[in-house]
Image (spheres, helix red, strand yellow):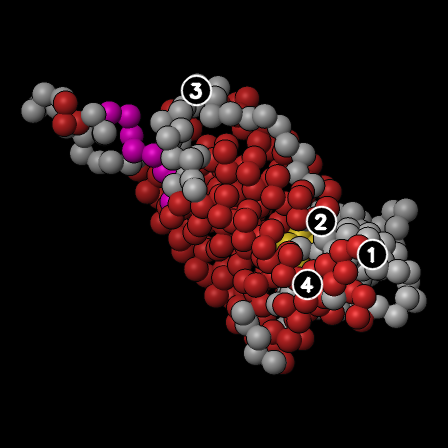
């Protein structure tokens, strides 16, 4: 999930894209046509994230740069691979300066130094071991439920992470952000649109829908807690939802069996009319939305100037204080 903390925010606070996904054992509820498409891309994603984290810890080299103001590096026997003091980074990981150096999402660098690549590199960085483990467990769980091939899985994951980073940058401008939460919420959004686009082939539609909506709502509510960047969650979810309508419609019943049917029995269209409509509308919305977001971002605009109430989407004042600029 995306979280905001001193670890992730170069100076202003770090936002971690950490999804503490409240997971429910939802299945395909009667439709299993894609069960053979377990993607090899998922273990590649997990391994790559782990390798990047190890590299970040090595670059961090806590014993060399830690002056002991917030405690000692630990554990000592790991040498340069030891972690920042718990008081500085309770997620057990590197410093915010190291994350910034490696490509954390930082509005100032993107807008004023043209470091647009941070929109994508932040997806592969994690603030600590806890952050990494939570996100990787979620990506494995959700990918098992989606059962996608490597191309569609890769597109949804990367574009959702991209969309989450763009929306986050428009609103969170004084903190850095790292994590795969935007991408993970994109997978949830894609699962929801896959269910809606293929509604007629599911045997337990309402049960599947309620289970999925429960997971989504719980995780979005978690996003209003302090230090969590819910804008990355929302941006990733919206992107994944639209991509699901574009990439995940299933052929109408009987289409794949046409070669075995009598010559006079043929389906005129591979997909139903509403699937075509949803796909076209979603493609238009996706292109327009990302284009507007990128133009606003590189013009240096602040999202709060156009949406004064949007700070409630990421933090609701109660027992804690909310600073919409941070």
Q: Which residue is mark 2?
A: 129
Q: Nearer the viewer, mark 2 or mark 1?
A: 1
Quarter in which the C terminus is drawn? bottom right
216 vs 200, left or right, is: right
Q: Which residue is mark 4?
A: 58
Residue 250 is covered by the magenta coloring: yes
Q: Are marks 4 and 2 in contact (CB under 8 Å)?
A: no
Q: Which residues are magenta?
A: 246-254
Residue 316 is covered by the magenta coloring: no
Q: Which residue is mark 1?
A: 76
19 vs 37, left or right, is: right
Q: Secondary structure at mark 3?
A: loop
Mark 3, other Cα within 10 Å: few <14 / some 14–19 / many ≥20: few
At horizontal 77% and vertical 51% (from top left) the residue drawn is: 91
Mark closest to the chain's N terminus, 4 or 3: 3
Q: Give the CA distance from mark 1 to mark 3.
A: 53 Å
At horizontal 69% and vertical 60% (from top left) the residue drawn is: 57
Mark closest to the chain's N terminus, 3 or 2: 3
């Amino acid at each position: 999930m995306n979280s905001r903390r001193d670890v992730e925010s170069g100076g202003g606070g770090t936002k971690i894209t950490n999804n503490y996904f409240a997971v429910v054992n939802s299945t395909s509820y009667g439709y299993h046509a894609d069960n053979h498409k377990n993607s090899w891309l998922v273990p590649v994603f997990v391994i790559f994230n782990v390798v990047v984290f190890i590299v970040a810890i090595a670059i961090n080299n806590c014993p060399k740069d830690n002056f002991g103001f917030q405690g000692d590096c630990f554990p000592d026997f790991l040498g340069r691979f030891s972690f920042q003091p718990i008081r500085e980074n309770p997620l057990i990981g590197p410093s915010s300066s190291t994350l910034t150096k490696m490509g954390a999402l930082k509005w100032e660098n993107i807008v004023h130094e043209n470091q647009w690549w941070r929109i994508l590199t932040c997806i592969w960085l994690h603030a600590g071991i806890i952050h990494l483990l939570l996100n990787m467990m979620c990506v494995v769980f959700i990918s098992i439920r989606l059962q996608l091939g490597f191309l569609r899985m890769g597109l949804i994951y990367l574009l959702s992470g991209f969309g989450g980073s763009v929306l986050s940058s428009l609103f969170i401008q004084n903190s850095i952000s790292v994590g795969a939460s935007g991408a993970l919420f994109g997978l949830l959004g894609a699962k929801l649109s896959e269910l809606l686009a293929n509604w007629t082939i599911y045997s337990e539609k309402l049960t599947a829908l309620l289970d999925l909506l429960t997971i989504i709502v719980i995780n979005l509510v978690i996003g209003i807690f302090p230090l969590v960047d819910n804008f990355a969650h929302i941006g990733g979810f919206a992107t994944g939802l639209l991509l699901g309508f574009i990439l995940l419609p299933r052929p109408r019943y009987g289409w794949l069996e046409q070669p075995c049917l009598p010559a006079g029995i043929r389906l005129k269209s591979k997909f139903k009319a509403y699937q075509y409509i949803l796909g076209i509308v979603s493609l238009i919305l996706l292109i327009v939305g990302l284009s507007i977001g990128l133009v606003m971002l590189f013009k240096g605009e602040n999202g709060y100037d156009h949406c004064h109430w949007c700070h409630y989407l990421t933090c609701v004042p109660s027992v804690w204080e909310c600073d919409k600029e941070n």
